[in-house]
Each structure stands twice: as C-alpha cells, then as structure tokens.
Image: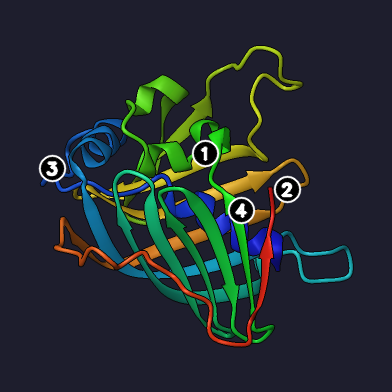
Amino acid sequence: MQRFFSAAFLGIAILFSGAALSQGDSGAEQLRQFVRNSKTAEGEFVQQQLRAPKANEPQDKGLKVVRQTQGRFVFQRPGRFIWDTQKPYEQKLIADGKQLIMWDKDLNQATFRPAGQALATTPAAILFGETSLDQHFDLVEGEDRLGMKWVALVPKKIPNTKNGNDLPYTKISVGMANGLPKALELIDGLGSVVLVTLDKIQLNVNLPANRFTFAPPAGAEVLRLN
C-alpha cells in the first residue's frame, strides 16, 4: 500500500498548467507550457495498479487491475500539495513546502518527514519546483492513443548514481489532450504499471493560506522521521 500510495505522489508531480493549446501542438510542447504556466490546480484522480496476466489466466484481456483508489488532489507551486485518497480507504499525502505528511485515518497515524532534496530529482520537481521541465528530463514524443498525445519523460543522467538517476521507474509517460494532462503511466523494473487518470481539473484557482496546514487529531499516533 505504501508503494502504491507513493506512486500517486510521483504521479501528481508531473502535471498542470493553464495554457489553452491546440490539440495540433505536440504533446511535449503542450506539457512544457502546461508546467510553465500553472500556479495552482485541483481536481479528481483515479489510480490503478496493473499487472500482466499470469500463466494460468486468460492472455487476451490485457493488463489486470489489482488495486484501484480514487480521490481528489490540490497543489500550489512551489512545494505544496494534497493527494487525498477517499476510496476504498481514507489517506492523505500532504506537502506543506517543508515536510511531507502521510495521514492514515484507519491507523489513526500521521507520519512526518522532511521534504529534503530528494524531491529535486523526482517528477515532483516538475510540479512543485520552479525549474524548467527540460532541466531534469528529455521529452520524447510517443504514440497517439486513447485520444491523447503521449510524451515519454526520460530522466537526465545524474553523476555518481548507480543507474544514472535515482527514480524508481523505468518509464514515465504523460498523456496530453487539449493542453491538459489526462493520464500518467509509471512502469518499474519488474513490469508493474501504475496508471493515474485525472478529471475535472480546475486551473489557477484561489486557495486559502491555510489550505496545506495539517494538525493530527487528538489521540493520533505521530511519527517523525529524519
């Protein structure tokens, strides 16, 4: 569950800008302008973890959904977001600009950890940072499918890391349509696929100053990690 939830955090990181672009523009250009122009956004998400069928399962039905969550998201550049999972369980991942907070209602537990420099080399930097998209990724045009122009994000090589970068995914793709990100695919080295689809996106909305403030309820277990 922790890994699935963290994928949502990476997923939201790649998205959001307010440019009204023609569907004729390349997916990469739509994504660049979308990231460049976004300040705030909110909307709904559905996140699915998928796997290939096993040997004893039908092979003609494509990838199988093994887990699905849904909820709402909100973000404010730079460094603030809420990824609010509402079904089938209630969890929140919150970044207030200084720390990451994971709230699990069923466990009545809040975990706090510093945001740190780790965000700088993850897709989170695209959403929550102020740097150029092209500083961290090479954008490669992909195929048109499901009514979207897909763009592969290839992490630039980082010196002194085992694989040249420290991302947990071997493939990151964003599906763009009419200037908006509609889907995100994350594939890891084991072939596991996380698909995030977005809906009802509202861009550059006004947010209250305390929107990203979180205080654990009385009696909750609080963990603080360095």
The image position of residue 182, as x and y in percent, is: 34, 56
Label 4 to label 1: alpha-carbon separation: 12 Å
Looking at marks 2 and 3 on the same chain, the residue that comes earlier in the sequence is marked by: 3
Residue 33 at what x, y percent from top left? 21, 35
User: Label 1 to label 2, Cα distance in Å?
Assistant: 24 Å
Judge depth for marks 1 and 2 and give the one in front.
Answer: 1
Counting labels gives: 4
Q: Residue at x 69, y 83 (%)?
A: 107
CB atoms of marks 1 and 2 within 8 Å? no
Using residue 169 as the reference point, say whether residue 127 is left or right of it: left
Label located before the other in sequence (4 or 1): 4
Instruction: Determine which of the numbered discs, if any, sits on residue 191 in the image.
Output: 2
Q: Nearer the viewer, residue 134 or 119?
A: 119
Q: Residue at x 78, y 46 (%)?
A: 190
Residue at the spot of label 1: 119
Residue, far top: 159
Residue bearing mark 4: 113
How packed is label 3: few (under 14 Cα within 10 Å), some, or many (20 or more)?
some
Q: Secondary structure at mark 1?
A: helix
Query: Left or right of 22: which side holds 99?
Result: right
Q: Residues within 10 Å of mark 2 (few under 14, many from 20)?
A: some
Which label's residue is closer to the chain start, 4 or 3?
3
Q: First in sequence: mark 1 or mark 2?
A: 1
Give the alpha-carbon distance from disc 4 to disc 3, as whole Å.
Answer: 38 Å
- Identify the mark nearer the N-term, 1 or 3: 3
**Residue 21 image label:** 3
Instruction: Tell me how the rendering is colored.
Output: rainbow
C-alpha span from label 1 to label 3: 28 Å
* Above-or-below relation of 161 to 26: above
Quarter assignment of residue 28: top left
